[in-house]
Image (cartoon, rainbow, N blue to C red):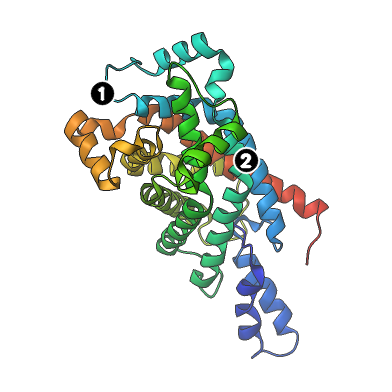
């Protein structure tokens, strides 16, 4: 990925070149800039570009993949302790369309759309900020460092954006599953949640969300960086085709699904309308295991796999393509 804080990256070049004479400083800085930008892409030197590009990519991705997120959440909330309502993915989609129309598959979408820009800004901004301290002298980020930087990015986005956004989304989806839905829309739902439960009502399952998002981004950035470094080899200026970027992103997304779906199930339960049944994140995990068995921790894996693979692939591809356009129309120093 391009560095959002490029001045931190280029300092190595002038320091090395200063020993060679006056004009060596410029050549050293240029070599360092090229090394710090895998695939020879233009550099992002203004954080506003990352915010805008991430928001556009996130918004498009959510509109495409949200129905799979809806189905995944419904299956996870359809606890085995009660008579299950859904027999599978297709049955869930069928009943939802019968009861609420196709628009029913997009219930809760607004809460994610409203959070797309700040979530992407925190994720990419924090990752790039941390990675600037972890890069080698030639600007390369190794896989282990990217895992730690991804972990930091995931924790930051969980606390600042994802937890309240996900809590509202899950409550909206869970509310629609009831016989008498209470929330008439996004603002009405948020107002009712805060009125009844206070601001804490939007931060249910914070610990589980931190664990989920931290592990999510750690795995994704680790896999993405590993695949990029493998593909680039000894040529940091090699162009990366968008289809290859998409394939790498889908692989990273799949790895994160298999790595942390149990945490996603626990997080969803902790944020649902029946979260009061659980004393803590650990108690939630114990109740799921005791009442429903170990396989319950992988409920919704198939729809989540489809959504996340598309999610990560789309976000990385659109993000990089939007950045290329912004670099042409928005000149920054």
Task: Tell which of 288 and 260 is nearer to you.
Answer: 288
Which image quadrant for residue 56?
Answer: top right
* Label 2: which secondary element: helix
In the image, residue 156 above or below residue 208? below
- Quickly name the residue at label 1: 80
At 43% from the left and 57% from the top, the residue drawn is 151
In the image, residue 235 above or below residue 65? below
- Quickly name the residue at label 2: 114
In the image, residue 32 above or below residue 64? below
Distance Cα–Cα, label 1 vs label 2? 32 Å
At 70% from the left and 49% from the top, the residue drawn is 52
Nearest to N terminus: mark 1 or mark 2: 1
At 56% from the left and 44% from the top, the residue drawn is 245
Image quadrant containing the C terminus? bottom right
> Left of 326 or right of it: where is 177?
left
In the image, residue 257 above or below residue 13? above
**Can you give x and y, in whole percent of width and height, for residue 331 in the image?**
81, 59
- Determine crowd level at label 2: few under 14, some 14-19, many 20+ residues with C-alpha closer than 10 A: some
Task: Tell which of 332 and 89 is nearer to you.
Answer: 89
Q: Residue furthest top?
A: 98
**Can you give x and y, in whole percent of width and height, for residue 324 in the image?**
72, 50
Q: Is residue 235 visible?
A: no
């Amino acid at each position: 990925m391009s560095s959002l804080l490029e001045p931190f990256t280029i300092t190595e070049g002038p320091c090395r070149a200063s020993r060679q004479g006056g004009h060596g400083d410029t050549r050293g800085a240029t070599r360092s800039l090229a090394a710090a930008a895998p695939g020879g892409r233009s550099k992002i030197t203004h954080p506003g570009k990352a915010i805008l590009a991430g928001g556009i990519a996130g918004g498009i991705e959510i509109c495409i993949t949200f129905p799979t997120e809806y189905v995944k959440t419904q299956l996870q909330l359809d606890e085995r302790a009660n008579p299950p309502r859904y027999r599978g993915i297709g049955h869930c989609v069928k009943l939802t369309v019968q009861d609420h129309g196709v628009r029913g598959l997009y219930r809760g979408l607004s809460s994610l759309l409203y959070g797309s820009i700040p979530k992407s800004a925190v994720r990419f901004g924090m990752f790039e900020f941390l990675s600037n301290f972890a890069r080698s002298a030639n600007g390369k980020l190794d896989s282990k460092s990217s895992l730690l930087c991804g972990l930091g990015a995931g924790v930051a986005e969980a606390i600042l954006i994802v937890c309240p956004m996900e809590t509202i989304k899950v409550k909206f989806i869970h509310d629609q599953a009831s016989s008498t839905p209470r929330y008439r829309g996004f603002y009405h739902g948020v107002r009712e949640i805060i009125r009844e439960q206070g601001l804490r009502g939007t931060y249910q399952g914070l610990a589980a969300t931190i664990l989920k998002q931290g592990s999510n981004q750690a795995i994704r950035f680790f896999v993405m960086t590993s695949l990029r470094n493998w593909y680039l080899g000894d040529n940091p200026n090699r162009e990366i085709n968008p289809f290859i970027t998409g394939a790498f992103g889908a692989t990273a997304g799949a790895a994160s699904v298999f790595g942390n779906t149990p945490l996603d199930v626990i997080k969803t339960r902790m944020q649902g309308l029946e979260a009061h049944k659980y004393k803590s994140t650990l108690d939630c995990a114990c109740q799921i295991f005791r009442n429903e068995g170990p396989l319950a921790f992988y409920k919704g894996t198939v729809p989540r796999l489809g959504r996340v693979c598309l999610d990560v692939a789309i976000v990385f591809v659109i993000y990089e393509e939007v950045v290329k356009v912004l670099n042409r129309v928005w000149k920054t120093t």
